[in-house]
Amino acid sequence: MATAEKEGMYMKIAVASGKGGTGKTTIATNLAVSLSSQGHRVLYADCDVEEPNGHIFLKPCIRRVEHVGVPIPDVDASRCSNCGACGEMCQFSAIVCINDRVLTFPELCHGCNGCILVCPESAIREVRREIGVIEWGNSNGVEFVHGTLRIGEAMAAPLIRAVKEHLPADAISIIDVPPGTSCPVIEAVRDTDFVLLVTEPTPFGFNDLQLAVEMVRALKLQFGIIINRCDVGNDEVRRYCIRENIPLLLEIPDDRRIAEAYSRGQMAVEAVPAIREQLLELWNAMVSRRNHFQRQP
């Protein structure tokens, strides 16, 4: 019986980064495969909905597709009195009253239904607008789900929220987070049990790592740092971890075999089997830290 089942330690682990290109998806997919090989029930959720690429490595068999929509206002002009209450309420200018016309801008709508609530004539109803799709599948024992945002959509957070609604309670969920620290990232890491911040030892990597650390601290989430290509660059990230008392959980050296496997869309654990043991040790470290914090008053 796997450790998670013995202890009831089902976790939602977010794999994030302050910038793109640090190896976030490599860590997320290979961690999922490594844990699955030990008998855990694992789900990989790609929440980088603007450019999901975990499927390139896991190669899942897709079994179900769901179209996701958000509510937007539809105005009945015959009932509208042009009072302007809807436009005054909307902070995003998704609905405005100009002269004797009410204009709606669906791409700006956040779906709060506020305009419907304040309309004195009940002239506004809710309709759905598709923003993307969610696909479910399986890849050699790893459960798979990802969202794909429709081209041209401005807001990724509603689709990310829809993906996360389907995470099982009795599994280890590995959430592949968009890069950066914007609203989609916050939506992806929200309510997770642990955040792995993947960085690289470069000035750009260090700068964006600090922003990501500020974000997860503001959200009061447990987190640790992984340095990818640790033997390239400088020691600034290591010194930062010591200075800020941040756990440095894993360092992965620059390895041509990993880069070649990545370029072919293959798993790193297949090219360098030793990485599997490192990732399992990483999992044990996360479980240990969570148990420690749960025991504290």
Image (cartoon, rainbow, N blue to C red):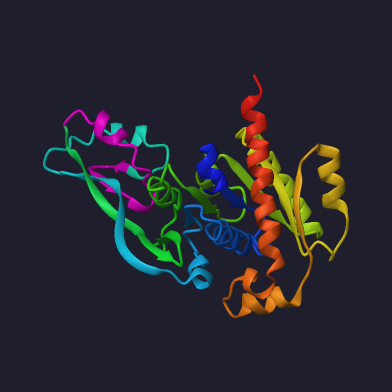
How many marks the image carries: the answer is 0
* Depth check, front residue: 228 or 116: 228
Instruction: Tell me the quarter of the picture where residue 250 sits.
Output: bottom right
- In this image, 158 relative to 268: left or right? left
Q: In this view, does 279 lie above or below 80?
A: below
Q: Which of 78 and 113 is in front in this view?
A: 113
Spot occupied by residue 6 in the image (x, y as percentages of width and height) = 53, 41
Q: In this view, does 244 lie above or below 262?
A: above
Q: Residue furthest left?
A: 78
Tell me where residue 220 appears, x and y as whole percent. Answer: 62, 32
Left or right: 122, with 59 as reference point = left
- The residue at 60%/52% (across/down) is 15
To which quarter of the image does residue 137 belong? Answer: bottom left
Of residues 28 and 36, the one drawn nearer to the viewer in this rendering: 36
Q: Which residue occupies 66% across, 75% down?
A: 271
Magenta-colored span: 96-121
